[in-house]
Each structure stands twice: as C-alpha cells, then as structure tokens.
Image: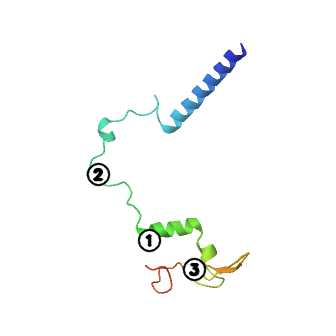
Amino acid sequence: MKLRTFVLILAGSMAIVGLACAAASGVGPSAPAADSAAIVASPNAAPAVAPPTPVERGRYLAQLGHCTACHTAPGGQPFAGGFPIDTGFGKIYTPNITSDRETGIGG
C-alpha cells in the first residue's frame, strides 16, 4: 500500500511539473495555433539581430571578465597592465592587453 501511494504522489508531482513547464514555454491548449508558414524560415530571411562586431564582442567579454581589475595598475590606463600581484615566488606584473601594436597585444 505504501508503494502505491508513493507512485501516485510521484506521478502527480511529475504531471504538475510537466504542466507548469508547458505553460511557461507557451505549449499547450492556451497557446495560439501556429501558422505552418511561420514555422519554416525563409532562406533569404535576415537575422532578427545582427551579430556583434569583433570589437563589440571583445568589449562585452572584457566587461564580463572584469579584466580591468588585474590589467590596470593603480592610476594607470585601463588594460595597460603593470598591476603587481604578489605570489609565493615573487611579484608578477600583469601584461598590457590593449590593442597597441608596439606594447599591447596588437590590433
């Protein structure tokens, strides 16, 4: 009897979670009927959003990684390096990761 109760509770819980997921994703009887022509994408259709340029992507990644925290010395230029990091075997100074061709990582 206990096994049957457990199975019924488990099945009911799974049904509730499934219905909640379907409702959240817009699948189910409340979702509007999809037009079959809208589902097939045209091969000539432009993307909804243009992909970011390499500079925009780099800016995003630098902000996401908070690169200035280590690659900017106190009072120095952003990303120009020179920030000292104490380690067990001495200080390491962070490199210049600017786009400068002579002193940075190039452009």
Q: Provide residue 19's location: percent of width, then percent of height.
A: 54, 30
Q: Residues within 10 Å of mark 3 (few under 14, many from 20)?
A: some
Q: Residue at x 55, y 30 (%)?
A: 18
Q: Is residue 42 left or right of residue 11?
A: left
Which badge, 2 or 3, is on the more N-terminal residue? 2
State yes or no: discs 2 and 1 in contact (Cβ < 8 Å).
no
Q: Nearer the viewer, mark 2 or mark 1?
A: 1
For the view shown, which residue lies furthest in the bottom direction? 102
For the view shown, which residue lies furthest in the left direction? 44
Q: Provide residue 17's location: percent of width, then percent of height.
A: 59, 31
Q: Considering only vertical position in the picture, is 31 above or below 105? A: above
Q: Quadrant of the N terminus?
A: top right
Going by the numbered disc 3, the residue's amino acid type is Pro
Q: Residues within 10 Å of mark 1 (few under 14, many from 20)?
A: few
- Alpha-carbon distance for marks 2 and 3? 44 Å
In the picture, the disc for residue 67 is none
Q: Nearer the viewer, mark 2 or mark 3?
A: 3
Q: Provide residue 40's location: percent of width, then percent of height.
A: 30, 41
Label 3, on which residue?
95
Label 1, on which residue?
55
Going by the numbered disc 1, the residue's amino acid type is Val
SS class, disc 1 = helix
Q: Residue at x 61, y 85 (%)?
A: 76
Label 2, on which residue?
45
